[in-house]
Amino acid sequence: MVLIFTDNEQLDRELNKSIENSRIVYYPDYILEEPQATILIATIQPNKYNFKDFMLKVREKNIRVILILENDKVSEMNDALLLGIYDIIFDPFELKEICDKIANPTPFSEISKYIKNILELETN
């Protein structure tokens, strides 16, 4: 089950049409209670949990997260990477990118440059 939690009504509808076995979600608690959830497509949203706490709870349930971010400079980027969220799509994007990401998770080699920045390692 792919859960869609973007807070963008048009994007939610388009994703729901394009992704088999998907459901639009409006409340974060539903995500944490859905036993069939395998993937969460999400943006940063205000809710009763802060981003880091909420994503930790999601990841503890072994739900893979595809995160849509404005850019790689947002403060939540580091938290996402530390929580093992490597499927990150930056705005602007096309719907096809999200659908492709479901089938093809991001390899660590593509995300390692961001992790090197967090760890303050030299990039080659």
Image: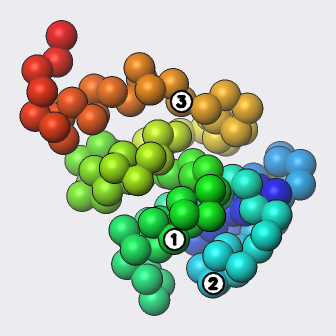
The amino acid sitting under disc 1 is Lys
- Label 2, residues with CA under 10 Å away: few <14, some 14-19, many ≥20: few
Query: Which residue sits at x=33%, y=27%?
Result: 112
Separation of disc 1 and disc 3 at Cα?
21 Å
Determine which of the numbered discs, if any, sits on residue 29 in the image.
2
Q: Earlier in the sequence, mark 2 or mark 3?
A: 2
Q: Is residue 49 left or right of residue 106?
A: left
Q: Inspect the image, locate mark 3, and give the three-letter code of the amino acid beneath it.
A: Thr
**Above or below: residue 105 compared with residue 30:** above
Which of the two discs, 1 and 3, sits closer to the camera? 1
Choose the circle earlier in sequence order: 1 or 3: 1
Asked whether the beta carbons under mark 1 and mark 3 sit within 8 Å of each other, the answer is: no
Quarter of the figure with residue 37 = bottom right
Judged from this view, the residue extending furthest toward the bottom is 48
Between marks 2 and 1, how big is the CA–CA gap?
A: 10 Å
Residue placed at 51% from the left, 71% from the top? 57
Q: Residue at horizontal 83%, vertical 48%?
A: 19
Secondary structure at numbered mark 1: helix
Residue 18 lies, in percent from the top left, at 83, 46
The percent coordinates of residue 11 (x first, y second) are 67, 58
Tag shown at residue 106:
3
Q: Is residue 117 visible?
A: yes
Q: Of the two numbered discs 2 and 1 on the same chain, state the one appearing first in sequence.
A: 2
Where residue 30 sits in the image (x, y, percent)? Answer: 70, 80
> Of helix, strand and loop, which one carries label 3?
loop
Report if the CB atoms under discs 2 and 1 are less than 8 Å apart. Answer: no
Label disc, if present, on residue 57 of the rendered structure: 1
Secondary structure at numbered mark 2: helix
Q: Locate residue 114, reporting x and y percent.
A: 27, 34
Give amino acid for label 2. Answer: Asp
Q: Residue at x 79, y 70 (%)?
A: 35
